[in-house]
C-alpha cells in the first residue's frame, strides 16, 4: 500500500485539481451524487494526469501510515460520500479491523 504522501502525489497526477483529474467530480469519480449507491468497475470515468483511475470516489483506499492507536489512514472518498469527502487532500483514520463495501486498497511497487 502507498503512504498517504505517495497516495496524494499519485492522486494529484501532476495537476492542481480539487479531485483526482478534474475540479468536476462527475468527470472522474463515483460518489453519493452519481453512484446509485454502489461500487462501479474501474476506468469508467476519466483518468488523472498520470493515467490513474478512480482515485477520487468509488472506494476509499487504505494507506500504509498508521497512528499511535494502530489506525490506518484511508483516502479518496467513496460511492457513498458527498463530493467534499472525495477531494485529494481529504482522508480519515480508521481502525484496521474496519471493513465495508466502500473500502479497498491500491497495490503499489517500487521501481528500481
Image (cartoon, rainbow, N blue to C red):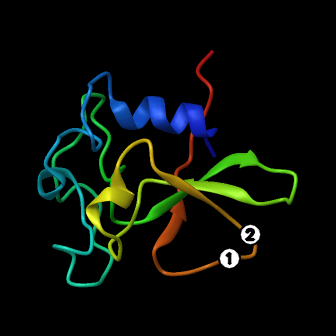
Q: Position of residue 95 (x, y in %)?
A: 74, 69
Q: In which quarter of the image is residue 37?
A: bottom left
Q: Against 14, is 67 above or below?
A: below
Q: Where is residue 103 in the image (x, y as percent from the top left)?
A: 52, 69
Q: Where is residue 5 in the image (x, y as percent from the top left)?
A: 57, 32
Q: Against 108, is 35 above or below?
A: below
Q: Against 53, is 81 above or below?
A: below
Q: Is residue 44 left or right of residue 62?
A: left
Q: Which mark is residue 23?
A: none
Q: Position of residue 29 (x, y in %)?
A: 24, 58
Q: Which of 7 and 68 is in front in this view?
A: 68
Quadrant (top left, top right, bottom left, bottom right) of the C terminus: top right
Other-residue count near label 1 (Cα within 10 Å), few / some / many at <14 / 14–19 / ≥20: few
Residue at (22% x, 42% y) in the render? 47
Which residue reaches farthest top?
A: 112
Q: How far apart are marks 2 and 1 (CA)?
A: 5 Å
Q: In which quarter of the image is residue 15?
A: top left
Other-residue count near label 2 (Cα within 10 Å), few / some / many at <14 / 14–19 / ≥20: few
Contact? badges 2 and 1 (CB < 8 Å): yes
Helix or strand or loop: what does disc 2 sit on? Answer: loop
Q: Which mark is residue 98?
A: 1
Q: Which of 38 and 4 is in front in this view?
A: 4
Residue to which mark 2 is pinned: 95
Q: In this view, does 59 lie to the left or right of 17?
A: right
Residue at (24% x, 28% y) in the render? 49
Amino acid at each position: 500500500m502507498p503512504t498517504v504522501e505517495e497516495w496524494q502525489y499519485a492522486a494529484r497526477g501532476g495537476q492542481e485539481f480539487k479531485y483526482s483529474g478534474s475540479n468536476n467530480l462527475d468527470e472522474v469519480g463515483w460518489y453519493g451524487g452519481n453512484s446509485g449507491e454502489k461500487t462501479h468497475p474501474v476506468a469508467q470515468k476519466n483518468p488523472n494526469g498520470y493515467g490513474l483511475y478512480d482515485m477520487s470516489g468509488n472506494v476509499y483506499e487504505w494507506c500504509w501510515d498508521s497512528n499511535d492507536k494502530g489506525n490506518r489512514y484511508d483516502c479518496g472518498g467513496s460511492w457513498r460520500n458527498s463530493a467534499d469527502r472525495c477531494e485529494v487532500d481529504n482522508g480519515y483514520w480508521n481502525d484496521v479491523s474496519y471493513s465495508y463495501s466502500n473500502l479497498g486498497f491500491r497495490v503499489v511497487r517500487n521501481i528500481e
